[in-house]
Amino acid sequence: MSGDGYADRILRVNLSQWTVGKIPYQKEWKEQYIGGRGLGVRLVYDIVDPATDPLSGGNAIVLAAGPLTGSGMPLGSRYSVVAKSPLTGTLSSSNSGGFFGTELRRAGVDAVVVEGHSKAPVYLWIQDGECEIRDASPYWGMNTDRAMEGIQRDLAEPKARVACIGPAGERLARVAAIMNDHGRAAGRGGMGAVFGSKRLKAVAVLGDGRAPRGNPEEFSRVRDVVREKIEKSGTNKGGLRRYGTAGIMNVINESHLLPTRNYQASHFEKAEAVSGERMSETLVDRVTACYSCSVACGRETRAGELKGYGPEYETLWAFGPDCGVSNLAAIAQANYLCNELGLDTVSTGSTIACAMELSSRGYIREDIRFGDEKAIVDLVRLMGFREGVGDALAEGSLRFSSAAGHPELSMSVKGQELPGYDPRGLQGQGLEYATSVRGACHVYGNMVYPEVFGVPVKLDPSVDEGKAEWVMRLQDLAAALDSAGVCLFTFRALSAADYAAMIAAVTGIPVDEASLLRAGERIWNLQRLFNTRAGFSRKDDTLPPRLLEEPISTGSAAGRVWRREPLLSEYYRVRGWDEEGRPTQEKLAALGIP
């Protein structure tokens, strides 16, 4: 331990050579990239050629915790998975909560870098700073729950935390997730397929230490201040606590911003049937929380004879309104199956919705209809095992619709499927989708907060003015929070200055609001630079044609489309990029990017 809040241990595993080494944790990485996503982005940027096939041994995947992960700071439980995405080709990250990240820190490890390709299935066993490569052949083919439990039995360590893939990742589904703690997912970008390409079934961790703290006295003071702010904000008592993330379903629908039937409409007539309120009445067994979380937005649920974790809002939307389905039990079953097979629920549900529209227009021979509640469950199974039409669907909606001759029906950006907020009624959120460095995303800079919920201030969702600056700030802040290892839901109660104080208290390294946002900007620009070298340009910073040309037909947003210009040009200007969206030499030099 270094005494500055970091374990100072980055493990480097090469599965081709069957070796385990260590990378020195450079002081400048802590100061400039914080940890978590930022550290992972820097490591992948240094190791991976942007032209590398994401499913080749040349790709590297990083599991990294931040300094707040497991520290005891409120909602400090997150870890990031970073690699070149097989879904998008971008330098991408996916973020997950639960307890895995905390256990990684307790085991005395800040990050694990995995390179190469094993000839046989393996898993990594990390305990107290050391790592072994172990045979995973007995678990290859198992679903995620069985694999987690089997590895714990094999280790005789029931308290070990396991992050693993299911059959979808093993079969290189580009929408495959990495699951931990049974119901938590590093879902977006196909990170599970990167594990699968390396024949890496799982990473298991256990530690008997405590996440380090650089300044114990200041830690206690700041922790108490943050707890009080969260308490006063009502974040741990409001709708998020009562109904989980699904509690916003009716709000988004009543605002006519709920994408329905593959974004053909923005209002679902049966949204109440799949709302958080209805889920609480019919499915929820108990409330769950990640490490050090007083909000407890998680849900253990039961649908008929089946039980599991979730569904979250995005899952309810993707399998529900987006597919025209109003049967809550069927949506829950599709969600459970995604967790077991290791599939990202957003991309999986959205890809099925795309197939439904292709079918309804006669563009594919399969009969897949909107509203078919049985189909969503059956198709999830086919996608997870890559059987029948599921083999093509597992490639994601853009590749599937392109093969059918109609890529315009994929509701995606850079190949990643859009989440459940219609950007035609949210100009800032549309800009965030279009410019996101990992493809369509709402957590890489969530403009839904100010444009819908008025947090931290209420912005008019219909106007362009000032949105570029807001999008940039929230993108940079989200990058910093992913790197610190804290949940984004704290944004409802805390400011950038609060986050800076939390990091400074844990690490003892001076951090203020300006340096925090500067770190986020540095991370964002490094991802953009990698993507530029991988072939991405201005042409990729856009939304599907439907959202540019077909107006919303109902509600207060009726008649609106997303206006790419002048928003995009203004965004490039405030970012300090050139007209093609490339970071300039001056900008890179100012950020200290090599």
Image (tube, rainbow, N blue to C red):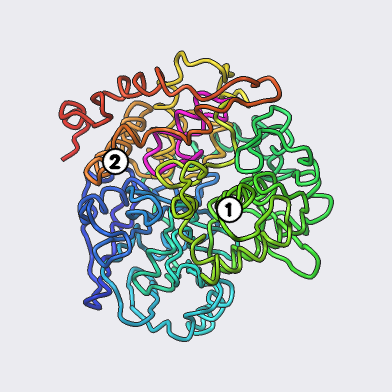
Q: Residue at x 53, y 77 (%)?
A: 147
Q: Nearer the viewer, mark 2 or mark 1?
A: 1
Judge whether residue 296 can be spotted in this image: no
Q: Residue at x 34, y 26 (%)?
A: 514
Q: Is residue 440 magenta?
A: yes
Q: Residue 198's spot in the image, x, y percent?
A: 34, 71
Q: Is residue 50 magenta?
A: no
Q: Amino acid at mark 2?
A: Phe
Residue that label 1 marks: 355
Of 247 and 410, nearer the camera is 410
- Sort mark 1 into few (<14), some (14-19) or many (20+) by Cα contacts within 10 Å: many
Q: How many marks?
A: 2
- Sort mark 2 into few (<14), some (14-19) or many (20+) by Cα contacts within 10 Å: many
Of 288 and 378, nearer the camera is 378
Q: Quadrant of residue 133?
A: bottom left
Which mark, residue 495? Answer: none
Q: Amino acid at mark 1?
A: Ala
Residue that label 2 marks: 536
Split into 4 quadrants, where in the image is the N terminus? Answer: bottom left
Q: Quadrant of residue 414?
A: top left
Residue range (magenta):
425-449
Answer with left or right where residue 361 lies relative to residue 541.
Answer: right
Is disc 1 placed on a helix, strand or loop?
helix
Judge whether residue 137 can be spotted in this image: yes
Q: Residue 548's spot in the image, x, y percent?
A: 50, 28
Q: Residue 466's spot in the image, x, y percent?
A: 44, 15
Is disc 2 placed on a helix, strand or loop?
loop
